[in-house]
Image: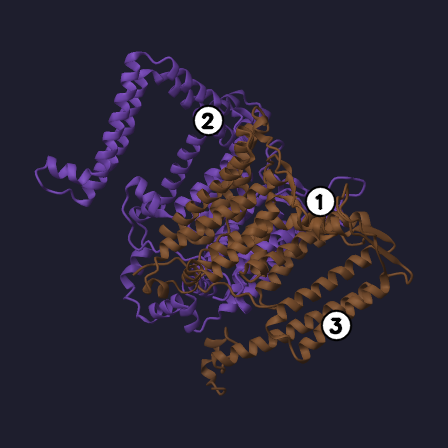
Amino acid sequence: MSTQADQVGQAAVPPPPADAAYKRQRQFSWRTALEAVQVPVLAFITALAVGGFIIVLTDLAVLNAFGVAVGQLTPSGWVGLSVALLVALALVGLYVWFGRAWARARGGTAPTPRQLELGRLAVLLGGVVVVYLILWAAGFGAAFGAAWGAIGTAYGAMLNGSVGSLSDITAALGSGDPAQVREAFYPMLESLVAATPYIFAGLAVAVGFRCGLFNIGVEGQLFIGAIFAVWVGYTFKGLPLIIHLPLALLAGALGGALWALPPAILKAKVGAHEVINTIMMNYIAFRLSDWLLNGPMMRPGNANPVSPNIEPSAELPRFFADPIRLHLGFFIALGVAVFIWWFLFRTTLGFELRTVGANPNAARYAGMSITRNYIIAFALSGALAGLAGANEVLGVNHNLASAFSAGYGFDSIALALLGKSHPFGVVLSALLFGTLRSGGTRMQNVAKIPVDIISVIQALVIVFIAAPAIIRAIWRIRTGKGGADTVFTRGWGKS
Amino acid sequence: MAATPKKLGQATTANPKRGLSPAEAAALAARSRHRVLGIVMLGLGLAGLWFFATTVTPGAISRFGLNQGGATAGVVLPELILYTLPTIIVLMAVCLALGGYQLWRGFGRWSTAVLGLAILCFIFGFLTWATADNSINLAGMLKNSLLRAVPLTLGALSGILAERAGVVNIAIEGMMLAAAMTGVIAASATDNLWLGLIVAVLTGGLLALVHGVLSIRYKIDQVISGVVINIFSVGITSFLSAKFLQGTFSDLNNSGTFPTVPIPLLSRLPFIGGIFFETNFFTYAMFFFLIVVHVALFYTRWGLRTRAVGEHPKAADTLGINVFRTRYIAVILSGMMAGLAGAYFTLGSVGRFDEIMTAGRGFISLAAMIFGNWNPFGAFGASLIFGFADALQGRLAILRVPIPSQFLLMAPYIATMIALAGLVGRAAPPAADGQPYDKG
């Protein structure tokens, strides 16, 4: 209650003249662009680093190498180890009391905040390097080598699996053999295929966030969208592609939107929190699809829960011969992203939607209908999620199996946060996640590192994005101006 | 007041009951809720009569076993034999009578309990219908329901502890999963189930500490923080499981389970004894904590302070209660409870960890918490119903009931949405639930 009063209070204060700020916002400058991406980029790098740390810590060969190194330490090696520990301790002290140390060295003048930041960063990075070198000299070289090797193999395999290797590409281009060229470009294009559902699903979450709604139900909406699309895909026969394919896609969007409506209506009418309702809708969707695939939609003459294959006229056309699976869906996704950008930032409806997200009380005061905007946002969000599902069944699988979604719905939350709920940010993050996903599969096969490490990295990315303070503390960057952090949800029940 | 000027119309569309004072609106809402409850009970009775009574052959008999399977030490009860049709008619008549009285006079503060009674009648009617010309072991079934309700209840208690202090804990699922894994590893490594249990509880507490730091200190949206912990837990447990437990270190994934400890004398009671007093540690712990949490929340100074922080942190702060510390303590306790719930899956049930073995139970316990209106015993009742649905779906195939088991499994989720919508009973979350507290 109290916060509501606060919000009303804030809304009542006349806004400052926004002219200058607005102009600044409209003008593109590299500086603001860099500031906008610095936290996401650093968050991603930090998450990768932590992921690498986990890979090293769980690599038995590396742990073994460290054990061997400790066992083989010479007396001078022990000295080196103790020196490294002491230096590390001293550096931690210097880091904490940097200001005091600076003042003593400079005869009483305290450092400016900028100097403090830079100094601490220098101590941090320099300290890591110095300690590393001492340990290396003390006889841990082989073990460090093993650790770097493990990280290199893992992330190298990931890179190879997601972008391909330069040598393969040049060799293939040199040979001029079409099959070989396709093979060489396969990883790169496969990443785009993997990114396609992420673009749709990420946009779905982003649209929700923009309206102050947290749609955790993307996963369920995606399933329902896929069910609708695949049903249209295999039921209607003899339609031309130009009719059948759009029909199937629209059915997917419709399914997702329908599935998003109950939480939207409950939120708008009785104020029931959308998070718990969308989670419930997820599980209902799983059970429903489970039943459908084991009953009415089961492929005749088959014991597995798989739907019949869709008609070729409902398939999203592919551009190249096998094994490349790049299909029209990717470009549709890009088009939809542009449309969403236009809708959110260039239409009245989009403006209303964002206003409701930013401050519902102000929006209501300005005569906007909260109910209507919640329902529009959720329907749009659900439709996008449904398109993600339709895209997968129409473009990649051509049928519906019970566990076809590899957690797109949940990854898309991370993705929307990483993209700052901006359509273009979402596209970029989706490309990144698609790359991670297709690279992760290869990492699992080559480096024997379970693909689930990707989830861990994604979780870390969300933490760092959602709590920029952590990233700013680690990397010692200053708070950006006007970095208003969005409030996503407001309690459970009545809001 | 009733003649509100028309020009304000659009601005107030979100509040359809305009023109009423808050007290009047609340009274109106309470009355309509009463009516809805009565209609729901009538609906249950009518639906049961229409669906069950008309599809049963007149002379059918339902037989219920009242003894636990296997060797029973106590008194052996004869089978309960009921004529299906009369039983259904009587039960549904009870439903109708309750609904009628609710509409006519109202049960007042007992409404929710009466609704529970009506639901119970309906469920028993359903069981009688399903077992027409068949037999089912009722005692075994109830025991199975209770066992399945154990992690749900513990999870719901976890949710209650955090949310009563104003912190949404959507990470119960993740905490359970991580605790299930660390518990089984510690228990296998040390060959001591109690150590495993302690490690599991500590794991839950540790993740809760992370949740607390993220949401209380860094003021991340509590839902996002919870989602993060869920994703992280699923990722790290699947990663470690695939990397170690399924392969080279499979001996670390074999802990055994807590043994069944019959309580002397009580376990010899007919029917009840086998269900309640002949189970393992977790069931007893559940009852223990059910009472402890209830008493602690509603009858101690700590509980009053915790609830104050959940309802109106600013007021609590003004009165000298340390909001942050109270919330930290509540969240960590919540995590430890979730850890206990997680340990059930491995140490209390199968003795080994499998990827994503909690399978959404954490979310169902959230549902139970909401359904039980943020009260321990309400949550326990909801958990029992959900556990019963879970236990029942395995038997449906045996009973040859023409309802796909998937639909039965949907029931808890649909029930939760209805409960949250405030259509049945009243979902009243703590007022400051989910709002980070900003001092100053």
Please provide percent x and percent y for residue A66.
40, 20
**Which chain is home to disc 1?**
A
Point 23% across, 38% down: residue? A96
In this rendering, is residue B343 above or below A160?
Answer: below
Labels 2 and 3 touching (C-beta < 8 A): no
Regarding residue B1, the answer to whether it shows in the image is yes
**Which chain is home to disc 2?**
A
* Badge nearest the viewer, 2 or 3: 3
Q: In which quarter of the image is the N terminus of chain A?
A: bottom left
What crowding class fits label 3: few (fewer than 14 Cα within 10 Å), some (14-19), or many (20 or more)?
many
* Badge nearest the viewer, 1 or 2: 2
**Which chain is home to disc 3?**
B
What crowding class fits label 1: few (fewer than 14 Cα within 10 Å), some (14-19), or many (20 or more)?
many
Please provide percent x and percent y for residue B331.
44, 51
Q: Which amino acid does label 2 sit on?
A: Gly
Quadrant housing residue A319: top right
Q: Chain B is drawn in which colour?
A: brown
Q: Which chain is purple?
A: A
Mark 3 — residue? B96
In this rendering, is residue B367 above or below B208?
Answer: below
Regarding residue B218, the answer to whether it shows in the image is no
**If you read the primary sequence from the N terminus, does the residue marked by circle 1 or circle 2 appear first?**
2
Q: What element carries label 2?
A: helix
Please provide percent x and percent y for residue A450.
54, 31
Mark 1 — residue? A310
Q: Is mark 1 on a helix, strand or loop?
A: loop
Tell if the residue under mark 2 belongs to the same chain as the one under mark 3.
no
Mark 2 — residue? A156
Point 33% across, 65% down: residue? B319
